[in-house]
Every structure is written in C-alpha cells, then in structure tokens.
Image (cartoon, rainbow, N blue to C red):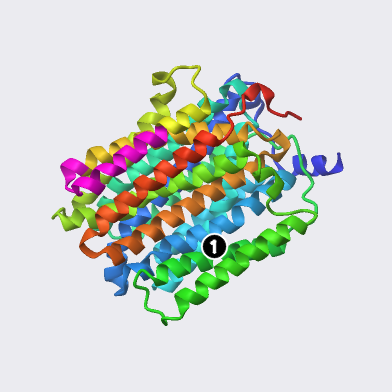
Amino acid sequence: MQNEAGVLLAERPRPEAVRGSPHAPWFAVATVCLGAFMGQLDASIVTLTFPALGHQFHTSLAAIEWVSLGYLATLAALLVPAGRISDAAGRKAMYLLGFAVFTAASVGCGLAPSLPVLVAARVAQAVGAAMLQANSVALITTSVPGNKLRSALGTQAAAQAIGLALGPTVGGLLVHGVGWRWVFMINLPVGIAGLIAGRYLLPRTRHARPIGRFDTGGVLLLGTATTAALLAISAGSGLSVPAVLPIAAALLAAAAAVAFIGRERRAAEPLLALDQLRRPVLGGGLTAALLGYLVLFGPLVLGPYALAAVGVSGAATGPYLTALPLGFALAAVLGGRLLPAGLGNRARGVLGLGLAAAGMAVPALLGAAPPVLVPALFVTGFGLGIFTPANNAAVMAAVPHRAAGSAGGLVNTARALGTALGVALVTLLLHAGGGSGVQLSSGLLGIVAVAAGIVTLVSADRPAARTQRP
C-alpha cells in the first residue's frame, strides 16, 4: 500500500472533466498515439538521411548505419528494464520523462557537428524512447476495456503507420530541401505537444508492482550481446575495421548471449522470465513480432538504393517508399472491418504475413523498377498492418495487468531487435551482393515473412476471456 501511495503521489491526476468522461480511455489512447507517431516518423525518416550523411561525413554506409543501429541496440537493452521500473514507479511519470528526454536529444542530433556526436545523441534519444515505448502498450492495456483492446491497439498501430507513411515523403523534402538536421528537429513540436497531452490526459498508475532486485548484470549482458552481434554484421558490410573484428564481435555476442541466458535462469529477479517465454503465445508471439518488424523496416533501407539503381533521384524516393507504410496504415485502420469478426489473432497474423511474403517475392523475382516495387511495397505493408495489431493483442492478453509494463517492454524489444536486424542485414546484402543485392535483400525479406508466418501458425491463440486479471 505504501508503494502504491508513493506512485500515486508521484503522478498528478487528470482533471475531473477528463477523468469522468466516457471517452477518457480514448483520450489516453490518443496521447499514446502521439508518441507512437513521433517514434515511427523518426524511424522512417532516419533511413532516408543515410546518403546525405555519407556525403556530409565522407564515410561508408556501414558506418552511417550506426546512426540507426546505435539507437536500436540501446533501445533493445533498455526496454525491458524501463518497463520493470515503470510498473513500480508509475507508467505516466516514466512516459512523460521519456518524452522530455527524447525531445531534448532530438535537438542534440540536429546540432551534432560530427558522426560520433550524432551517434551519441541518438543513443541518448534511445534512452527516452525506451521510457516511451515500454509504456505505450501498457498504458493502452490498462486504460481500455478488454473487449476494445484490439481496436485500441489497432489505433496505435495506425498512428505508427501514419508516422511511417509521412516519414519517407517528409524526410525526402527535408533532406533535399533544408538539410538532414531538420529530420531530427521536427521532433521538437511533436514532443512538446506530447508532454502537454500526457500531463492532462493520461491516467495515474493504479496497480504498482514492486521492482525487487534489479538485474543490472542482465541489462549489461543483453546490451553487449545485441551490440556485438550488430557490429559483427556491420563489419562484414564494408565498415573500415581490422579484419579480426567481425570474428571477435561474433564470439563476444555468442558468449554474452550464453552468459545472459545462464544468468536469467539463476537470478531471483531476472530481467527476462525465460519460463514465461516458453509459453507459445508469448515466446512465439515475440519471435513473430521481431521477424515482422525486420520485414517492415528492411525495405526502408533498401528502397533509396534500389530506386537510385534504376535512375530515380533522391528527392523523388520518398513518395515511392510511402507505399509500404501507407499499406500498413490502411490495414491497421480497416483490417478489423474487412476481416470476419470471428477471425482469431493467429489466423489474422498468418494471413497478414502471407501477404507480406508475397509482396517481397515480387521485387526478388522481377527487380525494383517503380511499377514493380511500389505495389509490392503496398501489399507488404498491408499484410504487416493486419499482422501487427493482432499479434500484439495476443501477447498482451496473455499477461496480467500488473505486469503490463514488462510485457509491453518485451513487445517493443522485439520491435527494436527486428528493426536493427532489418537495417543490418539489408546493408550487408547490398554490400555483398553487388548488382544483385536488391533482389537478394527482397528475397531474404520474403523468406523471413514466411518464417514469421510459420511461428505464428504454431503459437497458441489464447482467447481474451481466459486472460488473467488482478
């Protein structure tokens, strides 16, 4: 009780008019959507800066990709601990702090004088993003009635998709109009709006979960494993480093991963409850989420180079790439209406991933000319827009409300790892594949979508009525 009282005192209540409104849950959803919009706008814009950053700092794509990979590796390491802390300290308080850190770091990115400073500012940005993303799904889950959960998560997915959809077009205009620095500065007005909305529209945390003994060693091992693995892939993508580094990084990643699993099995308060991940609906759902986001973000790295290879100018790249997130947005908004109401999460997921695999198979077989690439990207995005809300709903319905922050952190960790792998693997294939790199990358993304569909198919779809409730 004392801990709960401390949490409630740390978070200011909403105004009575908001708290008593029948639309209060949707006010909270709308506020979370601002963060979702900003995060995905940032994610889809940043990949379009790669050519400009390479020209600005006179370095290779393998070095420039760390503007994304440094952010994503940090995010992946911090999402679960941020969720654990939020369950104890208050999700609203952590969410607002995350908005403030992310916005301030975005300004730092826009002012960065060199690539190392830009990467460091992106790492700081990821600290704020971890506090935002670890709480986003949890705030929705604890604000919206269970029978409206999939609709609410679909709305959040639509906000993410709108950010993704605007990213390529807005990013292209900014990069080729006023310069790459404004790609980061655009987060400032959105961040200010999010802070104001969060203060007045988000509910206080009602179910506190004691944090217990914090697994600092687990955080360090997870961060080491992910960063070393990404460095090994990046070193093979043309990064100017000693030849021994890829092997050393791969060995370090493997050793850190083994040590992390061993520690989590022994720890009294593990960062990841591995026994819970053995449940198909959780372990399978998170694995499918990772693979799905790999397929979603891989084309955003692939696209500018694929289109440049067929003569499309950099300024015109954005509108073509918008087809992917536009398909995602339409499916997230309309998918629930177009599909039968009785169709379960697993069936929706398999259907969506099948469409994504079909979409990626087209450029793998026929090349990346705009008449081929644009409809392929739209179909891929549409399929992933069906899959993502259904998969997230299945994962979140399998955990009690008191652990929603930790579960939301797991969902977003899977997203960060999938995004990072999408960036790293596509960059590797573009470098290694030469003239056939675009088709090799497209083929890999199609295979990954099939693998995600298989994982989803064999994962149990747990009805919401059986969900544990506090």
Q: Is residue 374 left or right of residue 297?
A: left
Q: Is residue 444 magenta?
A: no
Q: Is residue 411 left or right of residue 372?
A: right
Name the secondary structure under disc 1.
Answer: helix
Q: Quadrant of residue 422?
A: bottom left
Q: Which residue is mark 1?
A: 226
Which residue lies most toward the right here? 2
- Crowding at dot 1, Cα within 10 Å, few <14 / some 14-19 / many 20+, comes out as many
Rendered residue at 16%/41% (across/down): 371
Identify which residue, 167 or 247, lies in the foreground.
247
Q: Quadrant of residue 354?
A: top left
Q: Position of residue 327 (x, y in %)?
A: 33, 35
Identify which residue, 115 or 390, lies in the foreground.
390
Q: Position of residue 292 (x, y in %)?
A: 44, 43
On screen, residue 454 above or below 308: above
Q: Quadrant of residue 278?
A: top right
**Over which residues does the magenta segment extend?**
352-372
Rendered residue at 41%/81% (across/down): 243
Q: Position of residue 199 (x, y in %)?
A: 60, 39
Magenta-colored segment: predominant secondary structure:
helix
Asked whether residue 38 is in view, the answer is no
